[in-house]
Each structure stands twice: as structure tokens, then as C-alpha cells.
Image (cartoon, rainbow, N blue to C red):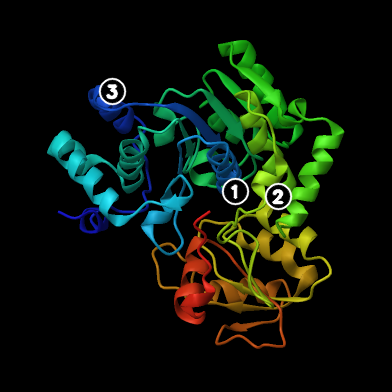
Amino acid sequence: MKLDAFLAQKPLYYDKIDYDRFPGIWHRYKKSFRLPKIIHVIGTNGKGSTGRFLAHYLFKLGNDVGHYTSPHILRFNERIWHNGANIDDATLEVHHAKLMQLLAKPDLDAMSYFEYTTLLAISVLGACDYIILEAGLGGEHDATAVFSKDLTLVTPIGIDHEQFLGDRIEKIARTKLGAVRKFAILGKQERAVYKVARELSLKNGAEFFRYTFFFTKEEMAKARRTIRNMQLPPFFVDNLLLALSGAEFFGCEIKWKEMEDLKLFGRAQWIARNIMIDVGHNPMAAEALVKSLKKEHIVLVYNAYEDKDYRQVLEIFKPIVKRVEILPIYKQRIESQEVLESTLEALQIPHREFEAIDKEETYLVFGSFAVVEEFLKHHVPEESHQIPTL
């Protein structure tokens, strides 16, 4: 069975997660896999860009590097990046066939979509010098947490996935930081996260560093210039510094110019003069974009999953939003249009259903990977997708 057909049988969402299943499967088969140096990326916001910054930089220094990220926007291949490019279909099928032969049918059937694709990524990227593994839902119980890690990078932790992780920063931080085994570098965090890190360090002996430990003021200024030269919003500076603190940890010299040819797909990306797309979906992401777009008066093309705090997101955007245009999406867990309209009316935000782009307006497409995917596939010419290879 081909990979696409196999994955199509796997549900993408679960009301409950079996946290013991994948560790047991990995224990049974781990002798069949090679693990290089693994850098685990956990947190709430900025995992994708932080991981790609580090993967790109290590690759530019001459290393063999893989990056596993999720979800994808247009094609599954985006989830597994190797030495500057998304993995090709033929390589995916070769490693899928290996796993189909290696794994017992009960284990193949039992694994979730994310668990299987995590194992697939390990198979594809096992010969690398480094693999950067981005956690999916959480930290301690995430499928990516079962592997022996050399370093963990912790992006800003905030409220998200409350039904699985809780609705308090302290509880979420304990779950995410529970994935740390040896060394971790903390990105910019709320005070409560630093407190949990100190508690865990005393409890299990893991060492936590702040990302600012690795850079002088002059180097931080170089990071700001680098982000400007990459034409990215200022909030990416902290993500870049966190990523390159990982390179510093492994003894790499920082050459800032090596970063400037990197293009990030779907992260605060202007795909036209008047259209920005961003795969963010939570209040932290909304706040970062509002700070970046504070001089704009935008049309927000939006939709949201029913379990997201879309009311708070919309409240955050309200000062810069001219109106919201709801992009119809027909997927599991998407909130009903009627409920979104009711929320917008309660917030006194003008709204209507999205139909087409007006060249005289400035648009932000935001809400989830699914929103950006729907917009790109059905409302933007394919040549404008600008999927980067680097």
C-alpha cells in the first residue's frame, strides 16, 4: 500500500491520546534505527521557524541535516526536509516500504498519523549528522520525545491545546519541559516558565540555559539586522537567536550572512504586495502579528478550529482590522460559520464571507495551516505559492 493511501486510513484527530503506545512500539524496534544527534524543539509558538533556522544554518556549515516539522500546508513532503529541500516522493515510498516490512501489523494499525510519520522521518533522516525534531501537540508525551536527545530548544510557551495540556501556563510548562533529558535552551518565556524550569532542574538534573547566555549585545544587534535583511518581522529575532544558540551549543561559529538566503513558507510571508499569509492560530501568534502590522489597516481572512480561543484572537486583531472575511472550510473540527459570525457581532467587528481579493485592500490570511492551505489552493495562482527549497 502506497504512503498516501496508508496515511488516509489514519485519523488526524483524537479525543483521547494513548501516551504509552508509541514508547512501547519504539522500544520494540529501536535497534533497527540509527539515531544521529537529535535537537528537540518544543514550545507553543515559533517551533517551525526556529527549527528551520537551525537546520538551514547547520546545513550551510557543511553538515548533513534533517528537519521534521508539522503539519504541512500543501504537500506532506514539507514535513521532512533534508539538506535544503523537502523530501521527494520516491524516498518517502522507499522508507515507507521498509517500515511496512519491519513493523508487525498490529503496530502499524495502532499508530496514529503523527506517530507513524515521526517514525518515517527517523527512517528517512537516520544517516544525517543532525536531526531537528519538532514536537507536535505537547512535550513530555509527544511522539518525538521518545528518542534520546542531545539538546532541547524551548520556544515561547503559552496557552494552546487546553483540552490536552491544561489552561494554566505552569501546567503546560511542566508537560512541555518534561521532555527535557539533558540540556535545554529556553527562548523568551513568561516568569512562570522559568520557575518550572528551575524546579525540574533540581528534580532531574537537566541543565537549562537562557538563549541570551550565548550572545553579546553586538551579536543580538547582528541578529536584528539579519532578520531585517531577510525581510521578516521583528518578532523572528528571538526565534533566530534561540535557533543559533543551538548551533553555539555544539561549538559552531556564527556567520550571520549564512542565514540571509532562507525563505520561510507560510510564516508572516508576503505572497503579493497586499497579501500576507501566516499559519499561526493562537493568541500569542496574533499578538506578534499585531505588533508587526500596527501601521496597517487590514482585512483579516479567517477561520478557526472549534477548540481554539478564537474570541481572544479576534479581540487582539480588532484594533488593526477593517473587517473579517470568513473563509469557508469544510473540515473536521472547524467551527461553524454561524458561531464565528455571532462572536464577531458580539465583538462589533464588521464581517462577511470571503469571495475574492480586492487589489486596493491589504489582507492577512490567518487562523491555522488549514486556512492558509485552503486560501493558497483555491484563491491564489500556483505560481504565487512560493514554496521554498531553502
Query: What is the number of the mark on residue 27?
Result: 3
Q: Are marks 2 and 3 in contact (CB under 8 Å)?
A: no
Give amino acid for label 1.
Ser
Q: Quadrant of residue 189?
A: top right
Q: Which residue is mark 2?
A: 236
The vertical placement of 305 against 322, above or below, is: above
* Few, some or many residues within 10 Å of mark 1 (<14, 14–19, 20+): many
Query: Is 63 on the left-hand or right-hand side of 200?
Result: left
The quarter of the picture where the N terminus appears is bottom left
Q: Residue at x 13, y 38 (%)?
A: 101
Q: Quadrant of residue 350?
A: bottom right
Query: Is 48 on the left-hand or right-hand side of 192?
Result: left
Q: Residue at x 45, y 79 (%)?
A: 378
* Label whose residue precedes the other's in the sequence (3 or 1): 3
Who is closer to the viewer here, 207 or 130?
130
Q: Are marks 2 and 1 in contact (CB under 8 Å)?
A: yes
* Label whose residue precedes the other's in the sequence (2 or 1): 1
Give amino acid for label 2.
Phe
The vertical placement of 292 against 15, above or below, is: below
Where is residue 125 shown, x and y percent of the image?
37, 38
Query: What is the number of the mark on residue 238?
Result: none
The vertical placement of 226 against 75, above or below, is: above
Where is residue 266 shown, x and y percent of the image?
57, 61
Q: Which residue is mark 1?
A: 49
Dot 1: element: helix
Q: CA distance from mark 2 to mark 3?
A: 37 Å
Q: Are marks 3 and 1 in contact (CB under 8 Å)?
A: no
Dot 3: element: helix
Q: Quadrant of residue 292?
A: bottom right
Where is residue 9 shown, x and y percent of the image?
23, 55
